Image: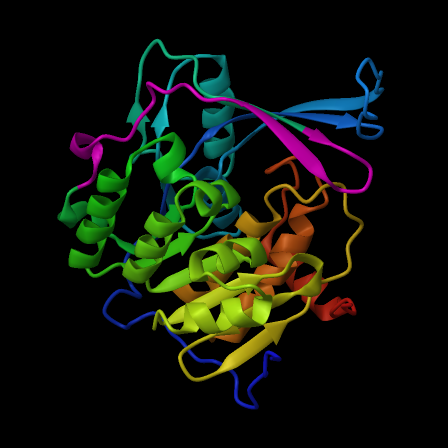
Amino acid sequence: MKIVISSNPPEFKIPGQVVNRPVDVIALGSLLMERIVQIDGWPMPGGQDTIPIQKVTDTAGGCAMNVACFIGRMGGRAAVLSPIGDGDYAKTARKELIRSRVDLSYLIEYPQKVGSMIMILTNPDGGWAALDYVDTELRIRMIDLPNVKKFSNSKVLHVDGFSFLTVSDEDVVLEAVRRAKQAGCLVSVDASVPAAKKKPAFLKRLFQEANILFANQFEAMAVSGANSLEEAVQGLREMQREVCVVKAGIDGSYIFTQTETGFVPTYQVEVVDTVAAGDAYVAATLLGLCRGMPLMQAAKRGSAAGGLACLGHGSLSSFFTDAEIDQLIRRGFKHNG
């Protein structure tokens, strides 16, 4: 079976009754400090291998935070719904939120908590592996959720695929989605590999509550029970959501509605690492939709943003703007294959 690209582009637009709301996206999920350790290569089997460190960079990350920060940097208005401490790890994250002009009013404050941290090892090929320290006491509780009235200020509630694994639980995430939908928000969900491995049934349930779905090939196959990319696209389509996006890395992305399928290639960049490229894709696509762009135009901006995110170490050290996205799009697509 082959994925057939439609002659007509898939179409979707933000409903008119929410397009003038002041907040573009509330991102629910993880927020932490990142320590990026750039190494010469992976250890060899057998242990006691010494790997030179090229560079260490402290920045911030977490999928929800990444989406909110990318949107803020591109001139949109975003907030992050996440717990945050007041220790050194949390201070690094808060500084990045402020620099990226993210609305802090949805943060859940935990005094006398250092915060969470992830150490990411990156190699010259752009690959990466992570070691994480998650403070399990930093949680989004039911009592912490905004009420329906506050959700009504936003166009989109975006749920990151780590949210119910690291900073919240399933019932709280579902209640946030329920309130957002009651307020007339669109709901966007981005999967994660750990969620697809550990809780595919709940991830599928969350997908079924959403308007806009994002997943990579592995996640789409896990949720849909498919054995190939082609079957995964069909499986997600059968969920009858308004928009589905399958991110296939260097091979581009597939964007589809109930009736049409489109394809967006990747853009040529000099990759430092690929951390948060998917979050940048999500952020630029959602912001494009919030600005009233056609779906495929928004997805092209998402692909360009994903490429630009690969120019820095870790999630947020590549500080690109709307103008740089425009410039990369004018340069044209990279060939795929």
Residue 132 place in picture, x, y as percent: 54, 24
- Please name whichever residue, 49 or 107, is drawn nearer the observer in this view of the structure: 49
What segment carries the magenta color? 121-146
Q: Quarter of the image holding residue 275?
A: top right
What residue is drawn where x is 44% and y is 31%? 31
Residue 332 left/right relative to 115? right
Q: Quarter of the image holding residue 331?
A: bottom right
Q: Does the magenta stretch include residue 154?
A: no
Is 151 located above or below residue 295 in the figure?
above
Is 31 located above or below residue 52 in the figure?
below
Q: Does the magenta stretch include residue 124?
A: yes
Judged from this view, the residue extending furthest toward the bottom is 7
How has the structure been colored for display? rainbow
Considering the image in quadrants, where does the N terminus appear?
Answer: bottom right
Q: Is residue 182 visible?
A: yes
What residue is drawn where x is 85% and y is 16%? 50
Residue 316 left/right relative to 24? right
Residue 328 place in picture, x, y as percent: 71, 62
Residue 184 place in picture, x, y as percent: 20, 61
What residue is drawn where x is 47% and y is 76%? 294
- Please name whichever residue, 136 or 83, is drawn nearer the observer in this view of the structure: 136
Residue 292 place in picture, x, y as percent: 41, 71
Is 18 located above or below residue 25 in the figure?
below
Residue 180 left/right relative to 116? left
Q: Can residue 266 be seen in this view?
A: no
Residue 62 left/right relative to 15? right
What residue is drawn where x is 57% and y is 90%? 7
